[in-house]
Amino acid sequence: VTTRARRGPRRTEALTKASIVEAATHLLDADGEHALTLRALSAQLHTGHGAIYHHVADMSDVLAAATDEVVATALRETPTAATDGPRTVLRALALGLFDAIDAHPWAGAQVSTAPWRPVRADIYETVGEQLHAFGVPERHLSDAAGVLVNHILGVAGQNAANAQAIARREEGREAFLLGVADQWAYLDPARYPRLHQAANHVAHHDDREQLLAGVELILAGIDAIYCNHTEWFR
Amino acid sequence: VTTRARRGPRRTEALTKASIVEAATHLLDADGEHALTLRALSAQLHTGHGAIYHHVADMSDVLAAATDEVVATALRETPTAATDGPRTVLRALALGLFDAIDAHPWAGAQVSTAPWRPVRADIYETVGEQLHAFGVPERHLSDAAGVLVNHILGVAGQNAANAQAIARREEGREAFLLGVADQWAYLDPARYPRLHQAANHVAHHDDREQLLAGVELILAGIDAIYCNHTEWFR
DNA sequence: ACCTGAACACCGTTCAAGT
DNA sequence: ACCTGAACACCGTTCAAGT
C-alpha cells in the first residue's frame, strides 16, 4: 500500500533478543511499565507482532531480561578494588544498585517480585564474597547476605516506587513532595504517637542516607553475632 | 431472556466496598493475581460491570484495599502483651506478617510495590513502638524501623513469590522444589564459589528460620550502634 | 529460519439507559 | 442513588501465509 508510512530507515540488522530488550528498556525508561506493550515494541522495532515471539517466550520474559541487564550492569560497574575493605565495597555496591534502580524504576518492583531469577545469584555471590572477607563464617553467610540484599533492594525499590507514584499522579503531587517527615507530622498523633514524634527528628529524609545507615546497622549486627571482632575484643 | 442462568440466590445485600474487597480476596486466594478481573468480580457479585465503579476508583484500588486488609488483620491479631519484651513482640510481629503473606501471596508483591499506602504507617508505628521500648533513641527510630520492616516484608515477599512461581509453572517444578541450598549446589563453582560453598552448610532452607535469624541480626546491630546496652556494658 | 499481520480471546473503563 | 450491559479502545498470543 502506498499510503503505508515508515518512520525512519528500514531496520537492517536482524532481530535479536538483545535488540528487543534494548528497545524495551527505552520504552520503559521513557514512559514507565505500562508503556511496554507488544504493539509499542513491534512499532519501535519496525516489525510485526509475531516476529518478537521468535526470540522471546512472552512479554514477561522481555521485562525480566531488561531487569536482569540493569542489575547485572550495576554489579559489573561497581568498583571492587581489593585494596578497599569489604565495608567500603559493600557501601559502593549498595549505592550502585540503588542508583541503577533509581535510573530504571520499573526494575525495582521486578527484582523484588522475581527472587528466583539467576541474576539474584550474582548479587548474592558478590555480597557473599565481601561478607566472607568481613569474617562471616560460611554457615551464616546466607542469613547475613539475605538481610543485606533485602535491605538494599527494599530501600531501592521503595525509592523507585515513590518516584513512579509521584510521576504518575497529577493531583496529590504536593503531598508526595512533602517528604516522609512532613507526611508523618500530619498523621493523627493519638493513633501514631511514635511516627508523629519521630517526624520532629527527621528534618529531611534522604533515601541514600537511609540506605547507608541501614548497611552500617546490619554490618554491626553481623559483627556482633557472627564475627565478634569489634575493637573491644581485639 | 429465559435461558439466562443465575447461579445461587439473587444478592440481597447492597453492594459495598467491603463486599467487593471480600469477593476480590476470594478470587485472589483461589486462583492468584491474574484471576482478579472486573468480569470475574462482577460475576461473583451477581452484578453488572459498571456497578463496581460506584464503590471503588478502579481495579488497582480493589487490589490495594484487599492488601491493606490482609496486613491490617495481621497487625491486629499479633499478640503484643506488655509483659513480653520488645524482642518477643517483634518476633511475633514478624511471624504474623510472614504467615499473613504466606496465606495471601498476592499481597506480598503488592505491599512491597506500594510503600506510600497508609497501612505502612501502621506497620511502622507498631514496630517503632517496640523499638522505643527496646531503647532506640528517637532520632534513630526511622532508620532502625526501616531496616526491620524491609527485612520482614522482603523475606515474606520472597517466600510468597517462590510459592506463586511453583504453583504457576508445571515444567521446572522439580527444580523449584529442590530448595535453595540444592539450587545453589548446581551453580557453576567457578563463577559462584561462595554460593556453591554455602550450599554445603544450608542442608534445608526454611524461610521462617531465615526470617527470625535476620530479626536477631538486626536487633543485635541496633543494640550495638544505637543502644549499647548489651550485657557486657551493664 | 525468519518475518508478517489478520484473527482470536481477552481486558478495564465509560456511559446512556433503566429502576 | 444505585445498577445495568452494550460499546469502546485497548491488550497478549497464535498461526496460516509469505520471503
Image (tube, coloured by chain):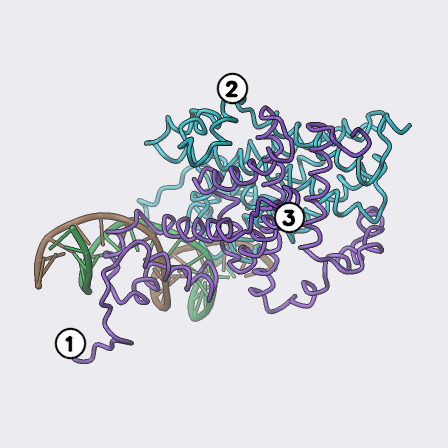
Chain colours: A purple, B cyan, C green, D brown
Q: How many circles with numbers are drawn on the protein?
A: 3
Give the CA separation, mark 1 to mark 2.
Answer: 65 Å
Q: Which residue is mark 1?
A: A1
Q: Is residue A128 above or below residue A9?
A: above
Task: Give the position of the N terminus of chain A as an image quadrant.
Answer: bottom left
Q: Which residue is mark 3?
A: A91
For marks 2 and 3, give the CA distance.
Answer: 30 Å
What is the CA distance from the residue labelled 1 to the residue labelled 3?
58 Å
Which amino acid, mark 1? Val
Q: Which amino acid is tagged 2?
A: Ala
Write the residue at 32% across / 46% down.
Answer: B2
The percent position of residue A64, horizontal first and vertical second, equals: 41, 48
Residue A90 image label: none
Looking at the rendered image, the disc whose residue lies closer to the viewer, 1 or 3, is 3
| Nearest the eye: A90 or B169 | A90
Instruction: Give the left or right position of residue A217, taking residue A153 as reference.
Output: right
What residue type is disc 3 on?
Arg
Q: Residue at x 49, y 44 (%)?
A: B45
Please identify, in this view, whether the residue under mark 1 or under mark 2 is nearer the observer: 2
Q: Chain of mark 1?
A: A
Furthest residue toward right: B234
Q: Please check whether the numbered discs 1 and 2 fall on a single chain.
A: no
Residue lying at the far top of the rendered structure: B203
**First of labels 1, 3 by sequence position:** 1
Q: Secondary structure at mark 3?
A: helix
Q: Which residue is tagged 2?
A: B203
**Could you confirm whether marks 1 and 3 are on the same chain?**
yes
Task: Respond whether the residues carrying marks 2 and 3 are from the same subunit.
Answer: no
